[in-house]
Amino acid sequence: MLAVAAGAFLLTGQAAAKEPCWKTLIDDWYDGRIDNVYPVPCYRAALEHMPEDVAQYSSLGDDINRALQAAIATQGPGGGSNTSGDPQSGVKGEAAPENNTFHGGPTSESSGALVAGRDVGGPVPSAIDAIGPGSADSVPVPLIVLGGLSILLLSLGAAGFAARRVQARRATAGTGTQS
């Protein structure tokens, strides 16, 4: 009896620690494409849980819908099996097929760096892709860049103000000693 209770406790602890598959799907998209294949209910749950700003200012909804249509075509409308049978937990975890099936994200028309999910742009797009956000909870790179620029501009403005004050003091001190 004790072994059964301990086993149940361990299984519920692991299930509670597992991230919902819709969140894993959205995290997977943050590099610009959906790399894995998920059960159909995960795509639907991701569409319901999209962050508002990302839904309005990015192609996440379109990319998830495109990947959902591809998943329905391969898995059927039922969505295939899930690791726990619950669309809120677990990920099927299969890698995307290495053929020309593309599940969303940038294409050669939009960015010039990716064609069918493969990098063709060279070192600059690879470096940009490497510094991109790793998950949905990370701070966006453009926000960090804008913050750095604002600090730089404020510093330059303060330095200009201080230089003008020093120059004004020297001018008044120089005119006072000559008379």
Image (cartoon, rainbow, N blue to C red):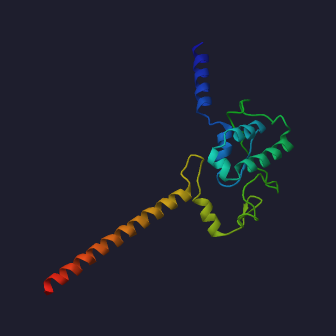
| Image quadrant in which the C terminus is located | bottom left
Which image quadrant for residue 99? Answer: bottom right
**On the picture, is 9 further left or further right than 62?**
left
Q: Is residue 38 above or below residue 35?
A: above
Q: Residue at x 68, y 39 (%)?
A: 22
Direction from residue 37 to residue 141 in the image, left or right = left
**Residue 157 in view (yes/no):** yes
Choose between 13 and 25: the one closer to the eye: 25
Residue appearing at x 77%, y 46% in the figure: 65
Name the quadrant containing residue 89.
Answer: top right
Q: Which residue corresponds to the image point at 13% horizontal and 84% vertical from the top-left? A: 177
* Residue 157 position (above or below residue 16): below
Q: Quadrant of the N terminus?
A: top right
Residue 40 is left or right of residue 121, and the answer is right
Q: Pick the residue in front: 4 or 80.
A: 80
The furthest residue to the bottom: 178
Residue 57: x and y in percent read 66, 53
Image spot of residue 31 (x, y percent): 65, 54
Residue 168 in the image: above or below residue 142 = below
Q: Is residue 28 visible?
A: no
Residue 178, horizontal then vertical, whole percent: 14, 87
